Image (cartoon, helix red, strand yellow):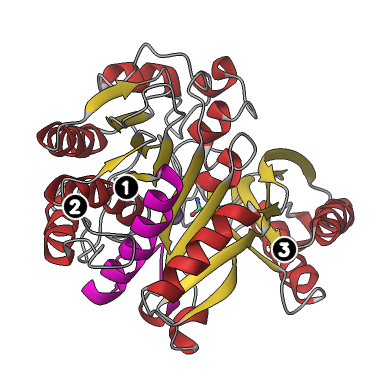
Amino acid sequence: MAALGQNLTINGERLWDSLMDMAKIGPGVAGGNNRQTLTVEDGEGRALFQSWCEAAGCSMGLDQMGNMFARREGTDPEALPVYVGSHLDTQPTGGKYDGVLGVLGGLEILRSLNDMNIKTKHPIVVTNFTNEEGTRYAPAMLSSGVFAGIHTQDWAYGREDAEGKKFGDELARIGWRGGEEVGARKMHAFFELHIEQGPILEADEKEIGVVTHGQGLSWTQVTITGKDAHTGSTPMPMRRNAGLAMARVLEAVDEIAWSHAPHAVGAAGHIDVFPNSRNVIPGKVVFTVDFRSPDLQVIEDMELRLREDAQDIADAMGVQIEFEKVGGFDPVTFDEGCVTAVRNAAERLGYSHMDLISGAGHDACWINRVAPTAMVMCPCVDGLSHNEAEEISPQWAAAGTNVLFHAVVETAVIVE
Ligand code: HGY
Ligand code: MN
Ligand code: MN
């Protein structure tokens, strides 16, 4: 029997092979992935993951938000399970590891426990949360948010994508709308392994990030309405150029974020211009401002100044402006006990490590509301993510999964 710390490591090659096999589903155009939520490709990825879990002897659960649960029994069926997982959906120009490493790392833990015939007191459940990215359906972490009671299921089902397709309808269409009540499952603890998606670990030459906190996020959708007009024959003084107003607002967004340097960040990733014709002055633009900071007061200040500055810009240019909060969560402090389990695991296994604040949002940020939660991070090359060139090394993947393995198994308690 492998005692904790002696030979308790995962099969890194098998993990890497699974990551590469999953990456074949919903390929991007530049080596990454485009496996957006509730697409046929998302369904194919789910089916592959389920087949692997069943081959590992798991029983499968599926709730009404499409969250998937692969359960490995413990010796005490009454004991609350230890959950471990992340998400399989990707950005349109996403990488092969964002989210996927956390789901397949959890599966690799079960496969390795099977190999070593190790039993745990608590069951262990590997989870895939639906629509973590929030790119097709805002907000991000939608389904873990419903699971944690942040959003109602009805509200989530009604979310629409750019083509007006509703979340609930699309989930049913791909055949992954389950019957379980969302959030009925109770957790002993939750662990999520994720690539850092930033440059800190690689720059500091650390193999493991012990995530103590997650920065807060705010998404404000801004709609500016001016007037479509001919780009050639409309005199400059007569123009009500929504595109120009957006440009000035985005300049203000940048200044607001910089005013809270070094930790605050701000930008707009989603921008729709109407009618988006070469010789028509934009009459309408819709864009989403993404502000983030570890400090809630800073987030609130940035949100307020956005509305004030943008309203002044709109008034000066004679265009209309509307604001809608479409996503957000407060900064997160993860569970001290779970964070210590992660840190002890990194030390026991001899990995270089450092405490870290997560720059990106994760399902763990919501699950932290309903269960003791912590995250493990591994570096990514040049800190690049949400880009098809996202890359990690097999060694980083194995190191992160080994630390996850120890934290999960220590919490699930090995039965001699
Ligand atoms: O937006 C985020 O931070 C996450 O990647 N969904
Ligand atoms: Mn992610
Ligand atoms: Mn992501």
Instruction: Check disc 1: other Cα within 10 Å, few if <14, some if 14-19, many if 20+.
Output: many
User: Camera-side residue: 288 or 241?
Assistant: 288
Residue at 49% in and 50% down: 276
Count of numbered circles in the view: 3
User: Marks 3 and 1: CB-CB under 8 Å?
Assistant: no
Q: Amino acid at mark 2?
A: Ser
Query: Judging from the image, what secondary structure is the residue with disc 1 in?
Result: helix
Sequence-first disc among 1 and 2:
1
Any part of residue 274 in sight:
no
Q: Mark 3: which amino acid? A: Ser
Q: Is mark 1 within 8 Å of ligand 2?
A: no
Quadrant showing the N terminus: bottom left
Task: Identify the magenta region.
Answer: 383-412
**Image quarter for residue 53?**
top left
Closer-to-camera residue (130/278): 130
Sequence-wise first label, 3 or 2? 2
- Determine which residue is flagged by label 1: 103
Q: Measured from the top left, where is residue 284 in percent x and y? A: 63, 44
What is the chief secondary structure element of the magenta stretch?
A: helix
Q: State the CA–CA distance, disc 3 to disc 1.
A: 27 Å
Percent across and percent down for residue 8 are 26, 62
User: For the residues carrying marks 1 and 2, which lies nearer the camera in this image?
Assistant: 2
Determine whether the residue tagged by mark 2 lies in a helix, strand or loop: helix
Q: Is residue 397 on the magenta stretch? A: yes
Q: Is residue 224 visible?
A: yes
Residue type at mark 1: give it: Val
Q: x, y (%) of residue 202?
A: 43, 83
Q: Which residue is mark 2?
A: 112
The quarter of the image holding the C terminus is top left
